Image (cartoon, rainbow, N blue to C red):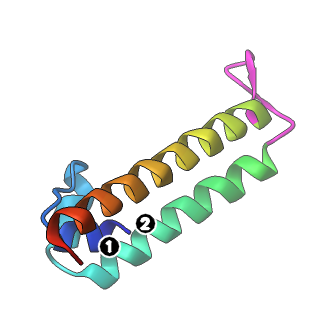
Amino acid sequence: MTVTLLSGGAVEVNPVMAALIYKSSGLFAGLKMAMTGIGVTLMVFLARYRFLRVFRVELVLYAILVGYIGLLGYEYWLMHALFDMTGL
């Protein structure tokens, strides 16, 4: 979705990912999937532990899931607005 939005005129706001997307879209996609996969896997393995002895990692994982679903919804909304503007 990010690559589709960028091709339609959107701007990547993450400076690290912005540097990668303009060098190689394959590297960008691979790194984005790897970072997400490693992060989720690590949190699943640590789900029973506590973060800073305060929050259970399981709850942090759910919070990140909700945030990620929100991000996907926002990107979907942006794509819908982009396609409405361009008539695609």
Q: In which quarter of the view is residue 54 placed?
A: top right
Q: As rendered, which of 18 and 10 lies closer to the eye?
A: 10
Q: Residue 32 carries which label?
A: 2
- Tell me the CA gap for discs 2 and 1: 6 Å
In the figure, 24 relative to 82: above or below?
below
Amino acid type shown at disc 2: Lys
> Going 77% across and 51% down the picture, which residue do you hit?
44
Whether pointer 2 and pointer 1 mark residues with C-beta atoms closer than 8 Å, the reply is yes
Q: In which quarter of the view is residue 7 placed?
A: bottom left
The residue singled out by tag 1 in the image is 28
Region in magenta = 47-57
Quadrant in which the N terminus appears: bottom left
Quadrant in which the C terminus appears: bottom left
> Going 67% across and 20% down the picture, which residue do you hit?
52
In the figure, 37 relative to 13: above or below?
below
Q: In which quarter of the view is residue 9 placed?
A: bottom left
Position in image of residue 41 (x %, y %): 70, 59
Q: Provide the secondary structure element on which disc 1 rests.
A: helix
Q: As rendered, which of 15 and 51 lies closer to the eye?
A: 15
